[in-house]
Image (cartoon, grey):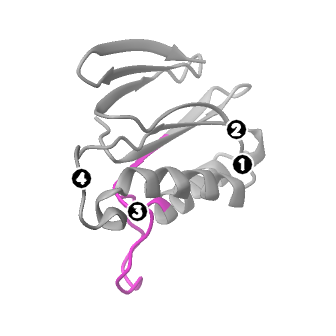
Amino acid sequence: MLGSCVSITLWHPHRLLGGMCHYLLPARHEGKTQALDGRYGEEAMVLLERAMRTAGTPPREYQAKIFGGGRMFSGRQGNKNVLDIGTRNVEAARRLLHQHGLTAVGEHLAGIGHRSIVFDIASGDVWVRHMSGQVQQRRVA
């Protein structure tokens, strides 16, 4: 279930390997002396890259897709920077993919409401169900 959170899926079309992260915030702002935490985009990408390298596959061979970043609070917002977490998460996802040599081949982002996704590792397809007042379901190839 993705509200303002973002999920990045990575799929290797030849080896049929895949990974997915679901992060809450782009980065951790307190000290980073703790173990890596996948709730933060920067750290989630490090964990995904480690998994790709452990599998013996370079990141550039993966197809990336991005989902989520919805606006969960409607109406006028006092401190837009604090409440617009979805936009910040989407910007972070694009930046992180670029930093890791990846390009998104599909996305379903922003808008109002939340979504759920199902990632089929056998095909690389991701099914999205977007609940924004009216339910929409579609495959993101």
Q: Is residue 113 above or below residue 35?
A: above
Type of amino acid at the residue the image marks with label 4: Arg
Secondary structure of the residue carrying tag 4 is loop
Residue at screen point 23% across, 21% down: 133
Residue depicted at x 50% and y 49% = 90
Q: Amino acid at mark 2?
A: Tyr
- Location of residue 72 with respect to 112 vertically, above or below: below
Instruction: Please tell me how crowded label 1 is: few (under 14), some (14-19), or many (20+) other residues with Cα within 10 Å.
Output: many
Q: Main secondary structure of the magenta part?
A: loop
Residues at marks 2 and 4, CA–CA distance in whole angstroms: 40 Å
Residue at the far front: name it: 76
- Residue type at mark 3: give it: Tyr
Tell me residue 120's x, y (percent): 49, 20
- The residue that disc 1 covers is 59
**Point 64% across, 46% down: residue:** 55
The tag earlier along the polypeptide, 2 or 3, is 3
Q: CA distance from mark 4 to mark 1?
A: 41 Å
The residue pinned by badge 3 equals 40
Which structural element holds mark 2?
loop
Query: Does the segment drawn in magenta span residue 30?
Result: yes
Q: Mark 4 touching mark 1, by CB under 8 A?
A: no
- For the record, the magenta segment spans 20-41
Residue marked by disc 2: 62
Q: Earlier in the sequence, mark 4 or mark 1?
A: 1
Label 2 with label 1: CB-CB less than 8 Å: yes
For label 1, the SS is helix
Q: Is residue 118 left or right of residue 10?
A: left
The answer to which of 125 and 106 lies nearer the viewer is 106
Given contact means CB atoms under 8 Å apart, are the residues at marks 2 and 3 in contact? no
Q: Which residue is mark 4?
A: 76
Q: Earlier in the sequence, mark 3 or mark 1?
A: 3
